[in-house]
Amino acid sequence: MDLPHHTFAFRPIRELHHDRNRRLREVVSPDGPPSPHGIAQQYSLAHHAFEGAEAAAHAGDTELFDWYRSHPDAGVEPAVGRAATTPGPCTVLAPGVHRLIRSPASETPYYVLGPRITKVPPELSQLTAEAAACAEAAGFGSLVAEHAVVLCLLRHKQLGETLDSWSITRLPGTIFCDYTDEPAVLARDLIHEAGHSWLNDALTAIHAKISDEVGFYSPWKGTIRPAFGFLHACWSFPLMMLHTATVLDTSACSRNLRRFLTTYLDEQRRLLAPTADDHGEALALIPDPELRRRLRAVHEEALAL
């Protein structure tokens, strides 16, 4: 795999993060101290603080609202263990599925950082650190560092069982996922969801308006999907494929892990192949030539595996 190191260094995203951080800070905590976190970390954590403050205001919970006002980074440092990942710091949570929030505002459940967060077991922090290091070794270090800032680990499963993962636009840089004992598999899923967050930010940053009236057949869903969803699939699944191919080429995998990843990659090759023609047409809907180039390069790289 030959993924350029600057693939994910898209200047409009960084400008978006700077601007959104400033605006969220003005709303939540205009008089608060400067954040000790990096720009990408601030961006993700500020959305948690805003979400929590808004919910507290609607509930009339003055105490909780004031807490968010005084903790514009959602209080992660005093409350939550940090995984010292190679690409960058990651806040790791294990709230349990039963504690996820279900709201009409989101199709999928989610969780918001707050004052009553507990530390995760050391083995989960270690698993996350090893997964991030695996992602970095495959060329995805900056993607994970800037778009997998908060990780909510959900259900422990055995290799081969169905793993659910998702992210939501309300909490960019936050990932919800099941996990196994294999760091390479967690890395794969982090890359997939971080890829979704990256593309959402990129499209927002360039003010792209992609028509919902144009649809393309998605082999992953087995149905016609709007161009927005099709482009997301043709970006995030290839990222997973490229990571998987690198792991298979360079890692001393166990027999079970190698079998699992080989089967996964073969399946993704089959699903990606029919998108070759439609992808170019979908890319034409994106107004920014630099973003089009990056999406095309990753798609073509994965097709060539």
Image (cartoon, helix red, strand yellow):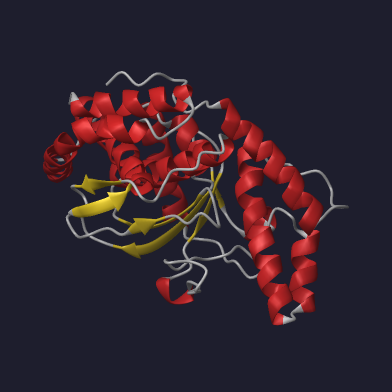
**Quarter of the C terminus within the rendering:** top left
Is 142 placed above or below 219 here?
above
| Along the viewing direction, whichever of 245 and 131 lies nearer the viewer | 245
| Residue 51 sits in quarter | bottom right
The percent position of residue 246, horizontal first and vertical second, equals 26, 28
| Along the viewing direction, whichever of 68 and 108 lies nearer the viewer | 108
| Residue 139 sits in quarter | top left
| Along the viewing direction, whichever of 60 and 175 lies nearer the viewer | 60
At a point 67% along the width and 52% down the height, the residue shown is 46
The percent position of residue 195, horizontal first and vertical second, equals 41, 40
Image position of 103 (left or right of 166)? right
At a point 42% along the width and 59% down the height, the residue shown is 153
The single residue placed furthest to the front in the displayed view is: 213
| Residue 164 sits in quarter | bottom left
**Quarter of the N terminus within the rendering:** top left
Image position of 57 (left or right of 186)? right
**Residue 115 in view in this figure:** no
The single residue placed furthest to the bottom in the displayed view is: 60
| Along the viewing direction, whichever of 197 and 42 lies nearer the viewer | 197
Is 64 placed above or below 230 here?
below
